[in-house]
Amino acid sequence: MQTLVSPLRSGINLAFQNVTPTRLRLLLFLNCSAAILFAFAAVTTVQQHNHAVRTVGVDAAPSVIAAHEIKIGVQMMDADLADELLYPAQGAETVEERSDFEKWRVRASKQLVSAAKNITYGQAEQIPIENIQIAYGKYLMQVQNVRDLHNAQKADAALSAYRQGLENVQTEILPAADALNKANADVLETIYAEEKAATNLSRGFVLVTGLILIAALLYTQIFLSVHFRRRLNVPMLFATICVTLFLQKLGSALGDNSNFLKVAKEDSYNSIFSLLDARSNAYAALAAESRWLLDRQNAAVYQKEYSERVALVAKFDNGDNAAKTVQLAKNQLAANERLNLPGFSGSMADELGNARFPGEAQAAMEALEQFGDFCAFDAKIRDWENSGNHAAAVKLCLGYNPSQSKYSFSKFDDALERTLQINQDQLQYSVDAALHNLSGLSIGAEVIALIAGICACLGLLPRIEEYVHCSPKPRH
Amino acid sequence: METERSTDDLLRASEELKTIVPDNYDAWRAQADLWLAAVHQLETRQIQSDDSVILMGVPLVEDRLRDAAEEALRQCAHFAPTVEIRVSLIDEANKVRRATWF
């Protein structure tokens, strides 16, 4: 024990018998350690922010959008096929429906490729995409079969084949698209929640480590000034200025980044999600309406589906309707009030409650207004069909004149597209700005830490040298 | 009268030290002590600056005396018998040196 304690004690005594050089070495160690800690904190925090922005804006959100677009495309293909069957096989309208079907097929196919290219979360994304691809190929063959039977004037067989295709859509493609959507949306929500909780903590940690480094540099400066009667130590001063300026830039960049991420997620992405949900459900309602006219045996099922889908887009309590709600929203906007629409729920209500960008609320209100008109046409279609006027009901359902259903629906879709575009532009802008904001900060932090370390050496080593080079001469 | 006596004392000490070759600890220490005493007396206004008065080749001006004392203490540190003394001599040299910007 004695032998262990003695060298330790003599080592400590040796270290502290020459107090000033020991203090100078400790200051050098303190400054270098603080610089390394600051670099570590800054790089970790910047990477964390970068990961959150990439998850929200680059990895997950585009896949969520692609999953919705696949759903929408397939639902529209189904609606177009149902519409095609409502027309005679060789008519001009059939050609138009097929052309429209083709447009949606191309769009859904592109989105499928886009989703496959953006696989980030392994099997959770790959399996749904594979399932969509398998069922999608099968569906296209089923569609061809339906068309062949329709062209051959075999209405019952065509309807039966159509039902098989619909079953494939409803039990294979749409659930797989929902699974793809969920895989990405869940990760996005989780990462964003983590980032939101950690953002102040990590920013605070970086600022504290930066302030510790500045305090160490300032203390060293004061120590040198007092003990060596040198008012300014240029390397230490230079390091202090560099670290202070960088810390200010880093703090403001991280703050801006959090704001950009908030705008991207809460203001843009949430709206996009609501709008895509609204669009998907509206298209499903449109397809259910056509099916109701086409497949009278299952009319009750399709009517129920239509009602459920419409309620998911916009539901009004207390006898309100789209027109009254839009008027209330317009009045609130004119009075510069935050939108508060009691009794109104569904995806469009979510969107109106989250309208943040110029022109967004107006476009969303226009969409809601047109959707209300579309629903009003639906009631008329069902009245006419139920009263035995099938041809007029079909014409009202499929016509694009201002007094027909599809006109309102296409106006609704245009307004919805504009609202979506506003949010997608803002999402892209916010993500680009956030990533641009973070670029170079990691390397900057490392360079600044290196500068601080080198400056601490340049500032302190000459002072330590003063004590080293005066070695005592042995006495004889 | 007091001032004159102090200056005279310093001059007398200076004359005596001139005969000693500064090649050891005590000689450098003695030179440093002479200049340190002069600095102290200037600081406490016991004597006035006078560049016509020369102490061991250094005019009786505070900054010049501080420079000389600092240099002597650093030279003395070369001959310090222990690390503690060497460190305290360098500390003393830094404490007495004239304040500079850098």
Image (cartoon, coloured by chain):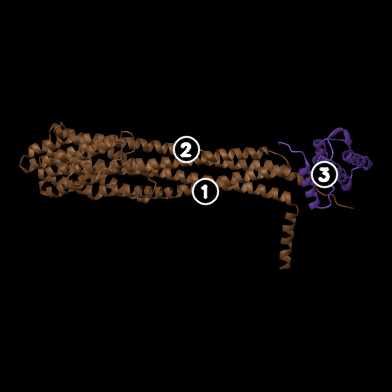
Chain colours: A brown, B purple
Q: Earlier in the sequence, mark 2 or mark 1?
A: 1
Badge number at residue B73? 3
The chain holding disc 2 is A
Q: Which residue is mark 1?
A: A205
What residue sits 85% from the left and 48% below the top? B79
Badge 2 amino acid:
Asn
Quadrant in which residue A384 is drawn: top left
For badge 3, the amino acid type reads Leu
**Front residue of this view, candidates A421 and A77:** A421
The C terminus of chain B lies in quadrant: top right
Q: Position of residue A239 (x, y in %)?
A: 62, 39
Is residue A64 visible from the viewing direction of this image?
A: yes
Point out which mark residue A437 bears. Answer: 2
Q: Chain of mark 1?
A: A
Mark 2: which secondary structure?
helix
Q: Secondary structure at mark 3?
A: helix
